[in-house]
Amino acid sequence: MKKLFLASSFKDAADIFEKFEKNTSGKTVTFIPTASIVEKMVFYVNAGKKSLEKLGLIVDVLEITTATSDEIRTKLKSNDFIYVTGGNTFFLLQELKRTGADKIIIEEVTAGKLYIGESAGAIVASPNIEYAKEMDSVKKAPDLVSFDALGLVDFYTVPHFTNAPFKKVAQRIVDNYSSDLNLSPISNNEAILVENNLAKTERS
């Protein structure tokens, strides 16, 4: 049974998460900030971390570009939850594949571990991330050979829908891809909750 919490901005959707996952006190979360390391704006990483700590979670940072394969495996398998922050979706997928973290995450989430994806972390849970080209630069992932992603869900999250500075870009993705893909656009104050193969959108 897969359980996922997909958001545009975790800080703005933390109250939805609190209702969704009531048992957070003292739990450990593997926190992957990798998508943000190629970006200039990274304030959301700290904001997400603080929001998790406020909920009583113990944050265990895993930066997969520099971690050993043992570290990656141990943290992803032993901690209670997995959290993937925003940033560049293509760079994130490149590094998840390069390190083999993608396979471990798929395995753990399929076995029932809660996956929390914020922005790029939500997009990468989709079957394929090519649709995010409008939002993120593919050039930041020169070694990425396939856009096939984690496939944890069968829909395609469009984060920051109606929110600056991504308002126009998110709308363009919806206009260009809605006839071919099962898109799920969410604003910064919304989250997609997945449980028992059912997905629903909640507003903060």
Image (cartoon, grey):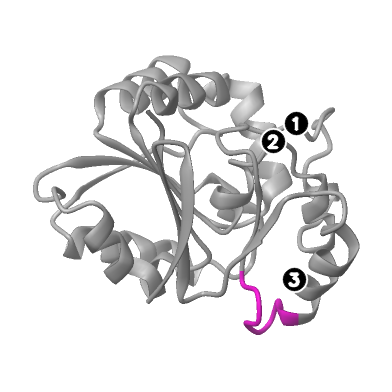
Q: Earlier in the sequence, mark 1 or mark 3?
A: 1
Task: From the image, tell me which residue sits under label 2.
Answer: 127
Which quarter of the image is occupied by the C terminus?
A: bottom left
At mark 3, the secondary structure is: helix
**Residue 150 lies in the magenta stretch:** no
Q: Is residue 47 visible?
A: no
Report the residue at 90% width, 63% height from top. 176
Amino acid type indicated by mark 3:
Ala
Task: From the image, tell me which residue sits under label 3.
Answer: 170
In the image, which disc is placed on residue 148?
1
Q: Nearer the viewer, residue 203 or 136?
A: 203
At mark 1, the secondary structure is: loop
Q: Is residue 3 left or right of residue 136?
A: left
Amino acid type indicated by mark 1:
Asp
Which quarter of the image is occupied by the N terminus?
A: top left
The reply to whether the C-beta atoms of the residues labelled 1 and 2 are less than 8 Å apart is: yes
Report the residue at 47% width, 27% height from top. 105
Which span is picked out in magenta? 160-167
Q: Quadrant of residue 30?
A: top left
Crowding near the residue tagged with mark 2, few <14, some 14–19, many ≥20 C-alpha atoms within 10 Å = some
Q: Quadrant of residue 173?
A: bottom right
Amino acid type indicated by mark 2:
Pro
Q: Is residue 173 left or right of residue 83?
A: right
Foreground: disc 1 or disc 2:
2
Image: 183 above or below 40 = above
> Picture coordinates of residue 62 (x, y %)?
40, 37
Mark 1 to mark 2 CA distance (whole Å): 6 Å
Q: Main secondary structure of the magenta part?
A: loop
Report the residue at 82% width, 59% height from top. 178
